[in-house]
Image (cartoon, helix red, strand yellow):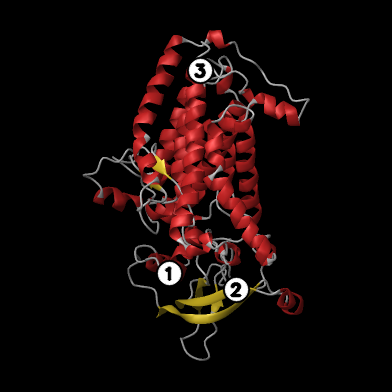
Amino acid sequence: MEYFSAEGYELARQVLQRGIAAVFLLAFLNAAAQFPPLLGEHGLLPAPRYLERSAGRRIPTLFRLHYSDRLLRVVAWTGAVASALLVAGLPQQGPPWVPLLVFGLIWFLYLSIVNVGQVFYAFGWESLLLEAGFLAAFLGSNEVAPPVTVLFLFRWLVFRLEFGAGLIKMRGDRVWRDLTALYYHHETQPMPNPASWFFHHLPKPLHKAEVLGNHFAQLVVPFFLFFPQPVASIAAGLVILTQLWLVLSGNFAWLNVLTILVAFSAVDDAAVRAVLPWAAFGSPDPGSTPLWFVAVVLLMTAVMLYWAWEPLRNLFSRDQLMNASFNRWHLSNAYGAFGSITRRRNEVVIEGTMDEPGPDARWREYGFHGKPGDPARLPRQFAPYHLRLDWLMWFLALGSSGGNWFPVLLQRLLAADPRTLKLLREDPFDGQPPRWVRARVFRYRFSTPQELRAEHVWWVREPAGVLVDPIKRRDRDA
């Protein structure tokens, strides 16, 4: 069926299916490790309470009738095993219905987690993973060629990602329009990585050139993804290169990796052979595509095109939404990031003491894995792994409300709760409960090259206020 099968896209199919499954594997492992202390029965925002409050809402989740940490772990590990099988390519060896079912399984299992994850799962890349995973289910198996319409829907996804991000920048902050955004971004981004300090200190004319290149990659290049080959492959290559630049300069969970993967939907085998002449790909017989598979894919395509209206209209709206889902299945989404850039970096630093508060009290700082703390500590690389608590601490420092979870976190630290302490890099009390904790705000900036040489610090910080005065443990835990 020539109209249905996309010959010459076998590498694209392999990258999409195996790569997206690898991100799902990481996401499920992340849930198994972090969901119980953050959102479990005794978490900072317990999922059972959320489900009780949402009893009247139609939330698609396996946990709607019952939540337990044990069930959560069963869901997470089942999803991880199924994802690992897809990474290995085993379901793809069978007929098309096998990867369809396996991808459908991991999509719904992860949807079940996201829909009860509240603020700790309120990130655009959660919806991106769900939408990409749903589409990957319809790419078929090695017995058939990838469907044309599914590759088109992947390109539409890349278009929304890139063009939406470009528009939100131009509308959101003048620093994107006057090309000065990178004077601040590397220093104030949520979670710098080991190279961020060096990117920040690049010459300002180069920063302006980077922003200009970003605008070209996000506002112009995405249109060429729908052009005939080799133009589409070149456009995808430019998207991939700009995303690799972002991978080098910051920690954005799996956002950039997933964008790179879905961009491969526009890369055909001929383009890869032009760069790697020795590359060889299988070529399934397009005539072997079962009629039932054609019907299922075309029905899914029609539904996705029907749902495409809202995100399309959003792109051209003056009140463009960023990282919003237009249905409860996370299959019709708006994307975009960094519509505005903060000019100064604040950090919330949590401290505890065994002494009574006063001028002689010795306060010791809790260390986080990813967020800046000790000025002498070089930022680490964690992406594509997602440090959810660290990200929420960044939003807290920006002034967002942590009223639902931050007071509970402080009480957990006062109780030296082992599950909570596992989310941190350093417990200054070695598992013993402190008598008091407090939260202070510090103004951070990257050190200058001279300060780095003289003082061996990557950051310079100064006190900027108190967020929470010293508190004791409550008699009844939160």
Q: CA distance from mark 3 to mark 1?
A: 50 Å
- Quarter residue 112 falls in: top left
Residue 245 percent across, percent down from the top left? 65, 51
Q: Is residue 334 visible?
A: yes
Residue receiving disc 1: 410
Q: Quadrant of the C terminus?
A: bottom left
Q: What residue sits 66% from the left and 18% below the top?
A: 282
Residue 386 percent across, percent down from the top left? 53, 51
Residue that sits furthest to the right in the current view:
278
Residue receiving disc 3: 96
Q: Which mark is nearer the camera, 2 or 1?
A: 2
Residue that sits furthest to the top in the current view:
287
Residue receiving disc 2: 445
Element type where label 1 sits in the image = helix
Amino acid type of the residue that numbered disc 1 sits on in the rendered structure: Leu
Instruction: State the mark number for residue 172.
Output: none
**For residue 258, above or below residue 457:** above
Q: CA distance from mark 2 to mark 1?
A: 26 Å
Q: Residues within 10 Å of mark 2 (few under 14, many from 20)?
A: some
Horizontally, residue 83 falls left or right of residue 447, namely left
Element type where label 2 sits in the image = strand
